[in-house]
Image: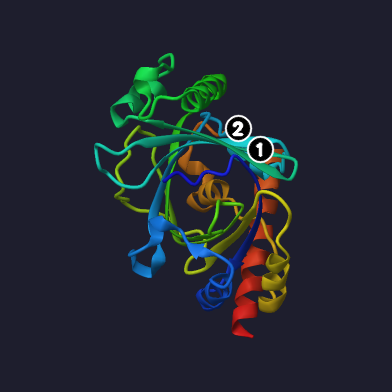
Amino acid sequence: MDRLQPQRFELKYLVSEHVAQAARDFVSSYLVLDENCLGQPNNSYPNHSLYLDSSDLRMYWDVINGNRNRYKLRVRFYNEDPTSPLFLEIKQRHNDAILKQRSAIRREALAAMLDGETPSEQHLFTVNQRNLSALKRFSQLMLQQRASPQTHVNYLREAWMTENGNSARVTFDRAVRIERRNTQDVTCAMVSPACPWGEMVIMELKFTGRFPNWFGELARMFGIMQCGVAKYAEGITTLGEHRFPSAWASAEQAQLTERFIQERSTQKRSHHSEVAA
């Protein structure tokens, strides 16, 4: 079942596995395990994304520059089953809110869509107006940015949600890996991925309405601090911009990248120090 939250707020934390397991016990008092996690090892299902960007990585630079109103384009998939859908997603930040649009398409339609074919109902896995509108918007932004596949990101997701609806959601993302992939290939295998956060776990607290008071209690109990965790941007930084030859960086952009790397290194050292303590 699709658990997409069209508009939500996200708070991200980088924690140790020990803290993640303790937080899981706390969260289980308020939320139930997502049905996609049931029966999975460590309550987690694989999550794959093929990220699109322009040849000069404009969407990556939007993150580095800290642009408040930015978006990402990605193809999300969970397996290699030829009968299962692919999801074309737009994840947009507008001030502090996260807006998402998602369209399920047939696997055999991906190449045509990424090549710029005009969206139509024949591309859809499930035909409805919401899917078609999201598909048209994705295509518009892709063509506007001249975006094409740049990276493949994979991780294991453990997800908890409110029992009735999905107004609050907590996820734990483990074993985050990224590799350069500039083809339309949506296979799950990775050849030589980078691991930006090693064994650390990305915990996200997500809500659509009023901030749940127990979210604050969770953060205070485990002494964790909110931080910026951008899988796509961090992945490119870890892989190295030299792997993307068209992404020419000016002196100013190089300085921004260096600052981004230093801030992330400081965050990681801080978290490791907390674990050691």
Taking 229 as reference, is 126 above or below it? above
Q: Residue furthest front?
A: 164
**Does the CB distance between marks 1 and 2 fall below 8 Å?**
yes
Q: Quadrant of residue 44?
A: bottom left
Please provide percent x and percent y for residue 204.
59, 59
The amino acid type, in three-letter code, at marker 2 is Arg
Give the structural element (helix, strand or loop) at label 1.
Answer: helix
Closer to the camera, 227 or 82? 82
Place residue 80 in its image quadrant.
top left
Residue at screen point 53% across, 71% down: 28
Q: Is residue 67 above or below residue 138?
A: below
> Closer to the camera, 223 or 208?
208
Report the residue at 38% width, 29% height from top. 126
Q: In x, y percent, where is residue 185?
A: 32, 36
Q: Which residue is mark 1?
A: 62
Q: Which residue is mark 2?
A: 58
Q: Looking at the rendered structure, which numbered label has been put on residue 270?
A: none
**Considering only vertical position in the picture, is 37 above or below 141?**
below
Amino acid type of the residue tagged 1 in the rendering: Asp
Between 269 and 36, the one lying in front of the other is 36
Distance from disc 1 to disc 2, alpha carbons, whole Å, reads 6 Å
